[in-house]
Image (cartoon, rainbow, N blue to C red):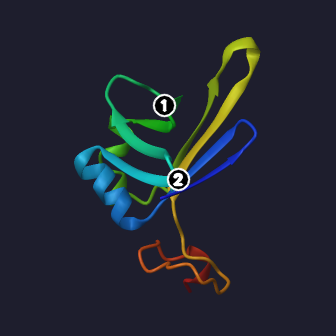
Amino acid sequence: MKIRIKGNSVRFRLTQSEVKQLSETGSVQETTEFGAQTFQYRVQLMKGIQNLEASYTQNEIVLSIPETDGKDWFQKEIVGFEHEMPLPEGKKLHLLVEKDFACLENTSEDQSDNYPNPKLQC
């Protein structure tokens, strides 16, 4: 799982096995260690919500997806989900979670579990 953060925007990209795990178990998580500090990010399915929601507490970002959307995401052609989460003072947090497609250009990153890029298919 990858995250990209820029300003008030957070984007999560999940591989095939991570989308499958999320659909089957309801959660997928990653950890990055910074010496004595640990940063975690998690995507989870949640009952009772209508849109993506995010929180940040104790060095962890949690992105919640409505269970009705995420439960069968692995079996569907849907690329991802997006939402502008309202914040205090009229601000918004842009949230995006999507399937991670293989890059069109060569990269040293392991992409064996990424989704096939639709731009490469005939």
Residue 58's disc is 1
Mark earlier in primary sequence (2, 1): 2
Image location (x, y in percent) of residue 12: 54, 51
Question: Residue at image x 29%, y 50%?
Answer: 23
Instruction: Between residue 43 and residue 69, name the one nearer to us.
Output: 43
Name the quadrant of the C terminus.
bottom right
Image location (x, y in percent) of residue 14: 46, 59
Residue, disc 2: 35
Q: Is residue 87 above or below residue 23?
A: above
Disc 2 and disc 1: Cα gap in Å? 16 Å
- Three-letter amino acid code of the residue under disc 2: Gly
Image location (x, y in percent) of residue 5: 67, 47
Mark 1 crowdedness (10 Å alpha carbons): few <14, some 14-19, many ≥20: few
Q: Is residue 80 above or below residue 103?
A: above
Image location (x, y in percent) of residue 56: 53, 31
Q: Is residue 39 above or below residue 66?
A: below
Element assignment for label 1: loop
Question: Residue at image x 75%, y 15%?
Answer: 90
Q: Which residue occupies the extreme left position in the image?
A: 24
Element assignment for label 2: loop
Mark 2 crowdedness (10 Å alpha carbons): few <14, some 14-19, many ≥20: few
Q: Which residue occupies the extreme front position in the image?
A: 36
Question: Residue at image x 60%, y 49%?
Answer: 11
Instruction: Between residue 34 and residue 116, name the one nearer to us.
Output: 34
